[in-house]
Image (spheres, rainbow, N blue to C red):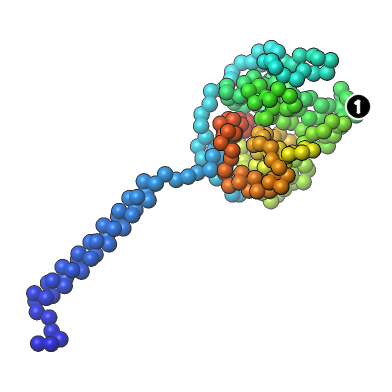
Amino acid sequence: MKGKYTPCCKMQTMKRKISISLFFILFLAACNAVASATPQTEEATPTIVPTQETATVTPSSFECQAAFERRELTEPYQRQTANQPRYTLSTDELNSYLDLMGIQSLCIPAELGAPFLSVDWNSVQNPATTGRMISISFENLYPGAGWSDGFLLYSTYEFSTGSEYDKFASLKDRDAVRNHTAASMIEINGVEGFIRFWPGLSYGNIPIYKTYVLPFENHYIAVIYKLGVFDPAEVDSAIQEFQAGRYPTDRLAPLEMMDFLATSLRFK
């Protein structure tokens, strides 16, 4: 009769419904299996405690240098005034500077090479200088002149001198960290700060640095690495790339070491 199904037809209909349901269940399971097998892309940022929007990833492990000797820098390099040679820091010399900076310990990866003093500008030695700035560079990141591509910096906020230099933080930055209003804030072993991509001083193409800045009451500590030199018209777009975690491939290995050094800092 029209409008009625026989038992046989009902059974076939149920089988079709079950088959369709099983098809969708198996299809969804296959999709989930593919998705879970796809590796997730993560920004190459070291392990830090984020206070705003910084991603966290487990850093690579590096062998830390345990002892340092005083010796002349590997030639060729630009010597000091009157052709005076430059020297790496001994363990005692390095510890004296770290003590002044308030640093209890840090890891300097062996691949960075020996630490040496780029500058120690202070008002005691130079009356034209106000405050103090200390830059400790690393031999394997040193191009042979100027400052190293990666360095550890100590500076008082009021620092000024006759030479050209970059300042990486101000009292305004210190207060922004205190008020938790600074962009890209981080916390490293109990000390709050921020990450910032900083265009440096230049008369031509402009260097861009990745900086870890940790402001204290009267001074700041910064770990700095140069990501390259860029045409002034490209600076903004380059910084946007870096903020997204996309770095020049030839800079990735040393950047990872400097990231690791920054996150190893422990203060007194």
Looking at the image, residue 122 sits to the left or right of residue 173; the answer is right
Residue 64 position by quadrant = top right
Residue 33 coordinates in the image, percent (x, y): 33, 50
The residue lying toward the viewer, choosing from 175 and 227, is 227
- Residue 213 seen: no
Q: Quadrant of the C terminus?
A: top right
Q: Is residue 14 above or below residue 76?
A: below
- Residue 43 seen: yes
Mark 1 nearby-residue class (10 Å; few <14, some 14–19, many ≥20): few
Mark 1 lies on a secondary structure that is loop
Q: Residue at x 67, y 42 (%)?
A: 197
Residue 136 coordinates in the image, percent (x, y): 71, 25
Q: Return the residue at label 1.
A: 127
Residue 44 coordinates in the image, percent (x, y): 54, 39
Q: Residue at x 61, y 44 (%)?
A: 242
Q: Which amino acid does label 1 sit on?
A: Pro
Q: How many marks?
A: 1
- Identity of the residue furthest to the bottom in this view: 2
Q: In which quarter of the image is the N terminus?
A: bottom left
Residue 208 position by quadrant = top right
Q: Residue at x 77, y 33 (%)?
A: 155
Q: Residue at x 19, y 66 (%)?
A: 18
Looking at the image, residue 123 sits to the left or right of residue 15; the answer is right
Residue 49 coordinates in the image, percent (x, y): 57, 42
Q: Is residue 179 above or below residue 46?
A: below
The residue lying toward the viewer, choosing from 5 and 264, is 5
